[in-house]
Image (cartoon, grey):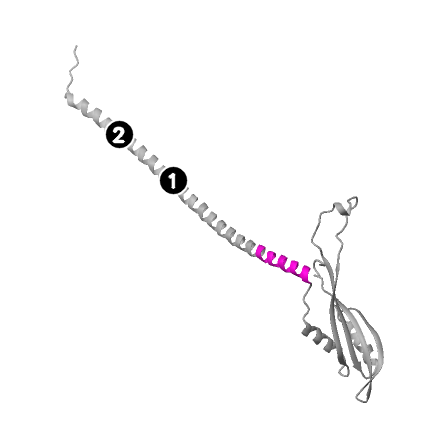
Amino acid sequence: MREIEFLPSWYALAQRRHRWLALQGWTSLVVLAGLGGWLLLAHRNIRATAAELSSVDVQLAQSKIELRQLDEQLELQHQLELQRQIVGRLGLPVEMSRLLQTLEGVMPKEMSIVELAVDTDELAKRPPTQPGVPVTAMRPSVTSYDRRLRVRLVTVAPSDVDLANVLAGLASVPFFENVSYSYARDKNQEGHLMREFEITFGMGLNDPLTGE
């Protein structure tokens, strides 16, 4: 017995097209969902990269600041090294005005300076020797000097008590060394009998940090 088909022929074609459109729709939806997820992930990666880039910029700015500070410190160290070399060659400067003010501060009012002589003594230092190495085999180095300022002071005062006071005052000054007097004798000045003293002391001119 033959089966009778009551549906028109176009109905099956329409169903196939409908299924094909549904499949295309679901495929498009999956593709759009995947694309949306990919865009979301890409956007999140971009934000993370931007945050890392901002952090790197901050670190770079900090590194530039530290580098500039390091350059300033190196420049200051270079200047200090130049000053140290100059001091090593010439010795520490001594302002005569400050020296005179210091002397005036420790001397009694009754004492007067008759003569003041200031000389500089330089003594070359020998380089340190190494055990087992001949001196002739050592490498030549920059010659350093032991510099001393030698001060000779001739004063007049009414009595020997003034001499004792000024010697104690000079000995109390930290940078005065070997304070002593050479002689003490009577001196007649315009009919006034006074005592004349010759006082000597020294000062170190080497750099206190390097000893040179």
Marks 1, 2: nearer the viewer = 1
Taking the spot 74% from the left edge, 69% from the top edge, the residue there is: 119
Determine whether the residue tagged by mark 1 lies in a helix, strand or loop.
Answer: helix
Residue, far front? 136
Taking the spot 71% from the left edge, 57% from the top edge, the residue there is: 144
Q: Is residue 83 magenta?
A: yes
Q: Amino acid at mark 1?
A: Ala
The magenta stretch is 74-90
> For the residue carrying disc 2, how many other residues have a C-alpha within 10 Å: few (<14), some (14-19), or many (20+)?
few
Instruction: Give whichever of discs 1 and 2 has the lower sequence position.
Output: 2
Residue 211, quarter of picture: bottom right
Residue 93, quarter of picture: bottom right
Q: Read off the residue under disc 1.
A: 42
Total of numbered circles in the picture?
2
Coordinates of residue 129 in the picture (x, y in percent): 77, 49
Coordinates of residue 193 in the picture (x, y in percent): 83, 86
Q: Amino acid at mark 2?
A: Gln
Front one among 55 and 6: 55
